Image (tube, rainbow, N blue to C red):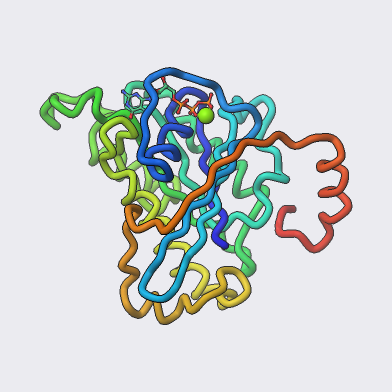
Amino acid sequence: MIKILIIGQSYVGKTSIVNRFVQNKFDPNYKATVACDFSMKILKIEETELRLQLWDLVGQDARVGGINKLFCRGALGALVVADISSRESIEATIEWKDQVDQHVALKNGQPIPMILVVNKFDLVESIDEDQLEEHMRQDFLDEFAEQNNFVSALRVSAKTSLNINQCFSQLVRQIFVREIQASSIGAGLGGQPESLYSQGFPLGGGQGAGSVKQSFALDHQQTKRDKKKKKGGCCK
Ligand SMILES: Nc1nc2c(ncn2[C@@H]2O[C@H](COP(=O)(O)OP(=O)(O)OP(=O)(O)O)[C@@H](O)[C@H]2O)c(=O)[nH]1
Ligand SMILES: [Mg+2]
């Protein structure tokens, strides 16, 4: 099971990205996520099924409430989402990334891989690259991603599907690379990831064998139970 966090400011399109990836659907109406939506997608690669567990977190302000660290437990990667029409949402990804880094790390202490996902590219797609505002340009985003230790920066659109499968497949590739480096692959991912890695991960989001989606909020009981279990967990 590969747990992936989907984080970023409110309204940037986190839920829309997950819905496009898991159900191939897009809803133009906004419905704020409450606490966390939980989805699963099974990717079948040759004879191996990879189970992606997607945690779509509420876009609460990272500087105020912060991410609930219980949500981060066991996460192996994250998509940090911004809205191309909001420079502020891009700058805010640094804060979101820092918060996750404080709560979870790989077994060797390395940070989990995170991709900068700049959504709603459809809004500016028709504009020439050199006419775009600075923060919308790929070269700016590449540099921003490098400076802030993101794996990469991808401009995507949940509305048109552009690069939606790619951001998940790129992230899963990085998870395998870092897990192999951390020598914890067997425990973390199950299956036969090393053989997958050597075959170059023929991952594409459209190959999902199945998916399921449900919502939940952490209730008091759950929080207490998790706190008790915390010893030995991967969240600090
Ligand atoms: N044009 C355009 N609109 C989008 C895109 N993705 C999402 N939206 C719209 O943006 C609004 C917010 O999308 P959500 O997916 O609910 O945003 P969110 O980040 O999950 O928001 P919270 O749950 O509040 O954190 C909705 O009205 C979506 O239809 C996109 O790629 N293009
Ligand atoms: Mg949402």
Q: Is residue 145 above or below residue 75?
A: above
Q: Is residue 149 above or below residue 67?
A: below
Q: Nearer the viewer, residue 204 or 183?
A: 204
Q: Position of residue 81 (x, y in %)?
A: 44, 36
> Does residue 197 appear left or right of residue 213 in this picture?
left
> Does residue 71 appear left or right of residue 182 in this picture?
right
> Does residue 20 appear left or right of residue 74 in this picture?
left
Say how many tags the image has.
0
Q: Which quadrant would residue 3 be assigned to in this image?
A: bottom right
Image point 31% across, 67% down: which residue?
A: 202
Q: Position of residue 70 (x, y in %)?
A: 72, 45
Image point 39% across, 25% down: which residue?
A: 27
Q: Nearer the viewer, residue 195 or 118?
A: 195
Image point 14% across, 32% down: which residue?
A: 129
Q: Which quadrant would residue 17 be assigned to in this image?
A: top left
Q: Nearer the viewer, residue 19 or 200?
A: 19
> Does residue 223 appear left or right of residue 76 in this picture?
right
Q: Quadrant of ligand 1?
A: top left
Image point 27% across, 30% down: which residue?
A: 121
Q: Is residue 19 above or below residue 101?
A: above
Q: Position of residue 228 (x, y in %)?
A: 88, 52
Q: Nearer the viewer, residue 120 or 222?
A: 222
Image quadrant containing the N terminus: bottom right
Q: Is residue 172 above or below residue 6?
A: below
Q: Position of residue 75 (x, y in %)?
A: 60, 54
